[in-house]
Amino acid sequence: MGLCRFPVMKEYRIMKKYLIVVAGGKGSRMGGEMPKQFQLLAGKPIIMVTLERLHAMDPSMQLILVLPAAHFELWKELSREYEFAVPLILAQGGTTRFHSVQNGLAQVDDMDDALVGVHDGVRPFVAANVLEKCFCEAWVHGAAIPMIDLQDSLRHIVGGNGVTEVVPRDRYRLVQTPQVFRLSLLRRAYEQRFVESFTDDASVVEALGEQVVGVEGNRENIKLTTPFDLVIAKTLMECWIPQQEI
């Protein structure tokens, strides 16, 4: 796992940071009438909880929220209702996550020597030190993503008759967000034609032949996808402090 080096810190500290927050899911697995990013967590839409925590961790970071165009009016209504005041740029979502990130990236009006992260709008529990490490390692290496160890055993399906074989879990990691990159690299990556193998931003960058460095994530940084996840999130809201020391 990466660890930011002291000699680069002076240069890194003056870098402009952007974070594209993607919130375009329909949330069919979550249930309910509202898309999952607008369902309530501690009395407030999940996406607002995420954005407020990110802004509190680094107020200098420019947030870019990507929503489907059909949700713009709802976002405006909810912003008024909950008196949401975090400064951000609103961008229109695309037909896939890849195209949504493309649209968010188009809102980055800066030179190539900036840093840009991409984060899931329904991950409100990323730790401050993880956010910082991802940005710092991206400055050093060009690309950095948070990952955590697997806790359960892992098996590979080897046939259609239910036969499986054990896989060494120490060779695998679970990937989280934010995934952070040098702006010039991410722009080149998203000039590529979309293919189904692009499952996240790291896979898009790797298609250029570039390497991606992993940093230690935090296990609380779950993606809220199902009702069970929401139960866990409500407990975390009561007992977890996101501003962990850096």
Image (cartoon, rainbow, N blue to C red):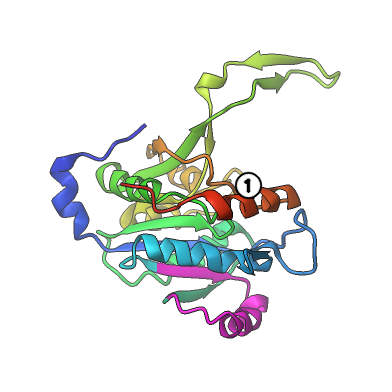
The amino acid type of the residue labelled 1 equals Glu
Q: Residue furthest right?
A: 161
Residue 63 percent location from the top left of the image: 42, 68
- Does residue 64 appear anywhere in the picture? yes
Looking at the image, residue 205 lies above or below residue 111: above
In reply to whether residue 230 is colored magenta, the answer given is no
Looking at the image, residue 79 lies above or below residue 163: below
Q: Quadrant of residue 81 in the image?
A: bottom right
The residue singled out by tag 1 in the image is 196
Residue 49 percent location from the top left of the image: 54, 65
Q: Residue at x 39, y 64 (%)?
A: 56
Q: How crowded is mark 1: few (under 14 residues within 10 Å), some or many (20 or more)?
A: few
Residue 3 percent location from the top left of the image: 29, 36
Q: Give the range drawn in magenta.
A: 63-86
Q: Which residue is drawn at 34% across and 67% down?
A: 59
| Local secondary structure at mark 1 | loop
